[in-house]
Amino acid sequence: MEIQIKTNASGELYLEDDTGRIARLYRFREALALARISAATYYTWVKRGLIVDVRLRDKGHWRLFTEPELKALIQVGRNLQAEAAGWQVPRPDRTTYESANGSPKWRESP
C-alpha cells in the first residue's frame, strides 16, 4: 500500500493511499497557528512528554500534522490554560489597605 502526499488547488495538503482514502494534513506553521502556540512551546511540550512528536514529514523534513494530532495539540493547550487559570493568586476579599498617613488607599467593594 503506497501513501502519497498531495496538494489541492488551494495549496492544502492531503494524504492519499491506494484505496482512495484521503486525510487532511497541516503544515507545521499552520498547525501551530490553529493551536495558538509558538514553535518553542511545541518543542518544549515534546521534550517534556506532554505530546508525541508527529510521525509524518514532507520532503524538506518539515513536520506534517494529521487531524487527530492537531486536535491533541489543541487539547493540550486548552488543558494547560485551564490549569494555569487555577493557579492565579486570589485577591484579598474585603480588606482595606492604608497609606502611610493612615487613610484608606484602596478598598475592595463588599
Image (cartoon, grey):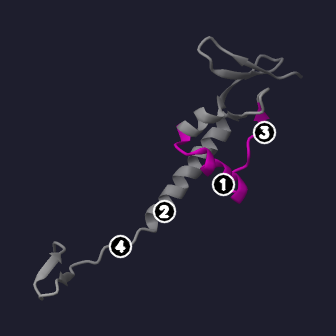
Q: Nearer the viewer, mark 1 or mark 2?
A: 1
Residue closest to the eye, 41 or 22: 41
When the figure is inspected, residue 70 is found, relative to residue 1, above or below; the finding is below
Q: How far separated are the C-alphas under marks 3 and 2?
A: 29 Å
SS assignment at label 4: loop
The amino acid type of the residue labelled 2 equals: Ala
Q: Nearer the viewer, mark 1 or mark 3?
A: 1
The image position of residue 81, as x and y in percent, is: 49, 56
When the figure is inspected, residue 81 is found, relative to residue 102, above or below; the finding is above
Q: How far separated are the C-alphas under marks 1 and 3?
A: 17 Å
Q: Residue at x 16, y 87 (%)?
A: 100
Q: How far separated are the C-alphas under marks 4 and 3?
A: 42 Å
The amino acid type of the residue labelled 4 equals: Pro
Q: Residue at x 75, y 21 (%)?
A: 21
Classify residue 94 as left or right of residue 56.
left
The amino acid type of the residue labelled 1 equals: Thr
Figure quadrant of residue 85: bottom left
The image position of residue 41, as x and y in percent, is: 60, 51
Residue that numbered label 1 is attached to: 44
Q: Is residue 41 magenta?
A: yes
Residue that numbered label 4 is attached to: 90
SS assignment at label 2: helix
Q: Is residue 45 magenta?
A: yes
SS assignment at label 1: helix
Label 1 or label 2, whichever comes before in sequence order:
1
Q: Which mark is residue 55?
A: 3
